[in-house]
Image: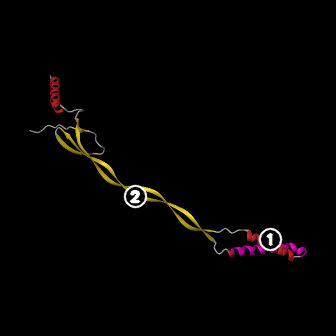
Amino acid sequence: MKNLSKVLLTASLALTCIPAWAGHKDRGFDHARVVSAVPVYQTVRIPVDERVCWQEQTRRPRHHSAAPTVLGAVIGGVVGNQIGHGHSKAPLTVAGAVIGGTIGHQVARNNDHRHYYPVVQERCEIQRNWHTEQRIVAWDVAYKYRGRVYQTQMLDRPGKKIRVQVDARPVRY
C-alpha cells in the first residue's frame, strides 16, 4: 500500500507539471523574433610598422694608391745605384729605394688634403605608427517574445530569431 501511494503521488506531481511546460520547446527553451540588432562599436589602436628610408650624405675614408710609394722607391733605388761603387752599390740601392719610397708616400699624403670623400647612402629604419579603427564588440538586440519586446546584448550578430530560455515559476497566492 505504501508503494502504491508513492507511485500515485509521483504520478500526480508529474501530471501537474505538464501544463507548466506546455507550449515550450526543448525543455525550457523557445525562439523569439529579432526586432532590431544595432552594433556596438569600440575604437581600437592598431600598431603599424613601416619601413622609412632616406638619403644621407656621409664621408668615407680615401684609400691611398701605392703608386707614389712604388715610384719613389724605384727612383730612390736608381739614384742610390748611381751613387754607389763596387761593394757599396747594393746597400746604397736598397737605402735609396727605402728613402725614395718613404718620400713618395709622404708626398702623396700631403697632396691629399681631404682624407675622406662624400658618399650618398640610403638609410632605413622601422617606425611604429598607430592606426585607429572602429570594431564591433557586441550587438544591442531587441527581440519580441509572446507580444512583449525585450532587450539583450550579444557578442555575435543574431539571425532572424534567437533562442530564449523560458522560466516558468509558480506564483504565490
Amino acid type, label 2: Trp
Q: Residue furthest left?
A: 173
Residue 130: mark in rendering: 2
Dot 2: element: strand
Give the residue displayed 16% in from the left and 39% down from the top: 147
Q: Which badge, 1 or 2, is on the more N-terminal residue?
A: 1
Q: Position of residue 21 (x, y in %)?
A: 18, 32
Q: Residue furthest bottom?
A: 83
Q: Position of residue 57 (x, y in %)?
A: 55, 67
Give the residue displayed 22% in from the left and 32% down from the top: 25
Left or right placement of residue 45 versus residue 66 in this view = left
Give the residue displayed 65% in from the left and 75% down from the top: 113
Q: Pointer 1: what residue?
A: 74
Q: Can you tell which quarter of the image residue 71 is in? A: bottom right
Left or right placement of residue 167 versus residue 73 in this view = left
Q: Quadrant of the C terminus?
A: top left
- From the viewer's side, name the closer residue of 40 and 67: 67
Residue 96: mark in rendering: none
154 vs 117: above or below: above
Mark pair 1, 2: CA separation: 67 Å
Dot 1: element: helix
Label 1 crowd (10 A; few <14 / some 14-19 / many >=20): many
How many circles with numbers are drawn on the protein? Answer: 2
Residue 95 is a magenta residue: yes
61 vs 156: above or below: below
Region of the chain picked out in magenta, as a range: 85-109
